[in-house]
Structures are given as structure tokens and as C-alpha cells.
């Protein structure tokens, strides 16, 4: 059975990413930049995926190109080390979580 997050609409989680960053004085555009860096979507492509209300599985499956440096993202999200996650889709989701966390923590240069 798939983890629930795989079938959760990306558009339902996206506002939470933005809210988390904005609470810490960061801008929505910065969240979009991080998402686009990881997935290869441009601004138009990201908006289209949000409007289509695709789930996380589809969002990452249709991503133009996962950044070749994404494997350099390290650290823990909810106590789980992102570099140790075996399921490729779950790892991509956690990479995104980690990038948004780092942005919200006020990191000027997110370590990759």
C-alpha cells in the first residue's frame, strides 16, 4: 500500500510550504525557486501542476528533471535522514521538505 502522501494533492500541501516560509519572513517566490530548482519546473509549469491538483506521485513523475545535485541534500526531516530514504519518491518528497525547512530557518545559502 502506498504511503498517503503519494496520493495527496501537491496543491493541498503547497500553501503549507509557503505559510511555513512566510512565518519566518521568507517570500512565496523563494519557495517557488526552491521547488523549481529541485524539480526542473519553470514558474508556468509549477502553476499548471498546482492548478491541475496533481498528487505528489504525478508531480514528481512529470517533473522536467530532478536537479542532478539533489542527492547532495542531507539532514533530517521528522527524525529521518533524507539521504537514507530508500524509496525514490519518498526521498524526493523529503528533499523538498528539507529545502523548505532550510529556507524557513532563514538560511541564506541552502547547503546542497
Image: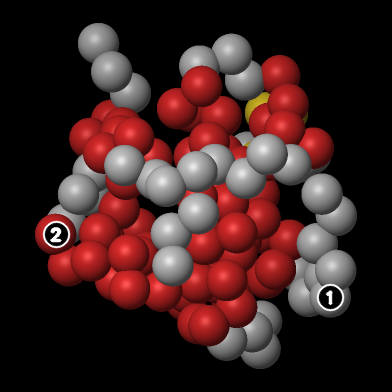
Residue 31 screen position, x and y as percent: 55, 72
Q: CA distance from mark 1 to mark 2?
A: 32 Å
Q: In the orientation shown, which residue stands out farthest toward the left?
A: 52
Residue at image position (48%, 28%) is 90
Rate crowding at label 2 as few (under 14), some (14 to 19) or many (20 or more) other CA atoms within 10 Å.
few
Q: Is residue 26 above or below residue 55?
A: below
Residue 59 screen position, x and y as percent: 32, 45
Residue annotated with mark 1: 108
Residue at image position (52%, 62%) is 36
Image quadrant assignment for residue 51: bottom left
Residue annotated with mark 2: 52
Q: Nearer the viewer, residue 65 or 9?
A: 65
User: In this orientation, does residue 70 appear?
Assistant: yes
**Along the polypeptide, which appears first: circle 1 or circle 2?**
2
Image quadrant assignment for residue 8: top left
User: In this orientation, does residue 50 appear?
Assistant: no
Q: From the viewer's perspective, tell me whether residue 103 is left or right of residue 90.
A: right
Q: Nearer the viewer, residue 22 or 69?
A: 69
Amino acid at each position: 500500500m502506498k504511503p498517503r502522501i503519494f496520493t495527496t494533492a501537491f496543491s493541498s500541501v503547497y500553501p503549507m510550504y509557503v505559510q511555513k516560509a512566510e512565518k519566518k519572513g521568507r517570500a512565496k517566490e523563494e519557495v517557488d525557486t526552491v521547488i523549481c530548482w529541485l524539480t526542473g519546473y519553470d514558474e508556468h509549469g509549477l502553476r499548471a501542476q498546482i492548478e491541475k491538483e496533481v498528487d505528489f506521485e504525478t508531480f514528481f513523475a512529470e517533473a522536467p528533471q530532478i536537479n542532478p545535485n539533489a542527492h547532495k541534500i542531507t539532514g533530517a526531516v521528522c527524525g529521518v535522514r533524507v539521504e537514507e530514504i530508500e524509496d525514490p519518491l519518498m526521498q524526493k518528497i523529503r528533499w523538498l521538505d528539507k529545502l523548505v525547512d532550510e529556507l524557513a530557518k532563514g538560511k541564506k545559502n541552502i547547503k546542497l
